[in-house]
Each structure stands twice: as C-alpha cells, then as structure tokens.
Image (tube, rainbow, N blue to C red):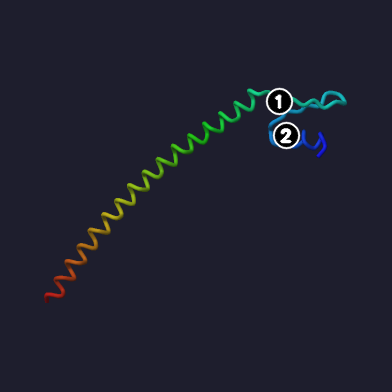
C-alpha cells in the first residue's frame, strides 16, 4: 500500500481529517477527537442498554401475566373435565 492509500483509508474511517489548500492536501488528527468519538459511542451504547433492559423487564412481566392466565384457564378446563367424567 502506498502512503496515499493508507491516508485515504484513515480519512474514510474518520480517524484523520483532510483539507485541500491550494494545490496541497493537508492531513491531521487530534487525539481529543478520537477520545470524544469513543466517549460518545460509549454513551450511546449505555443509553441503548438501559432501553433494552427496560424492554426486557416489560416483556418478562407480560410473559408472567400471560402464564398466570393460562394456568387459570387450564385449572378451569381440568375442573370442567372432572365434572364431565363424573356424569
């Protein structure tokens, strides 16, 4: 790979900034930019994690509610079946 290809790859990945001034191309990278980018990504992922945990909790509650409803229905059906067998 040539230096030009490597620089273009870094620019495409957002790790290096570039600007054309006159006939020259200038490339630069600030350590704080990479740090801020990682911090922003961590914050976004933590926010998504909180939302997914809340969704999981709601789904578990809904599942528990549905299972309780089924248990009542099965118990009712069993008692009805018992009555039918007695007759």
Could you tell me if the residues under marks 1 and 2 are in contact, i.e. CB atoms within 8 Å? yes
Q: Mark 2: few, some, or many residues within 10 Å (few <14, many ≥20)?
A: some
Furthest residue toward front: 1
Considering the image in quadrants, where does the C terminus appear? bottom left
Q: CA distance from mark 1 to mark 2?
A: 10 Å
- Label disc, if present, on residue 10 of the rendered structure: 2
Please tell me which of labels 1 and 2 falls first in the chain.
2
Q: Is residue 39 above or below residue 85?
A: above
Q: Residue at x 46, y 38 (%)?
A: 49
Q: Quadrant of residue 75?
A: bottom left
Considering the image in quadrants, where does the N terminus appear? top right
Furthest residue toward left: 87
Could you tell me which secondary element the residue under label 2 belongs to?
A: helix
Could you tell me which secondary element the residue under label 1 belongs to?
A: loop
Q: On the rendered structure, is 19 left or right of 40? A: right
Q: On the rendered structure, is 85 left or right of 69? A: left
Q: Which residue is mark 1?
A: 29
Residue 46 in the image: state x and y as whole percent: 48, 34
Q: Residue at x 20, y 63 (%)?
A: 76
């Amino acid at each position: 790979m040539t230096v030009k290809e490597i620089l273009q790859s870094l620019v495409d990945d957002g790790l290096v900034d570039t600007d054309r001034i006159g006939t020259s191309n200038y490339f630069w990278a600030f350590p704080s930019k990479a740090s801020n980018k990682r911090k922003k990504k961590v914050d976004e992922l933590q926010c998504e994690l909180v939302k997914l945990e809340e969704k999981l909790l709601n789904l578990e509650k809904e599942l528990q509610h549905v299972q309780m409803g089924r248990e009542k229905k099965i118990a009712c059906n069993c008692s009805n079946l018992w009555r039918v067998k007695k007759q």
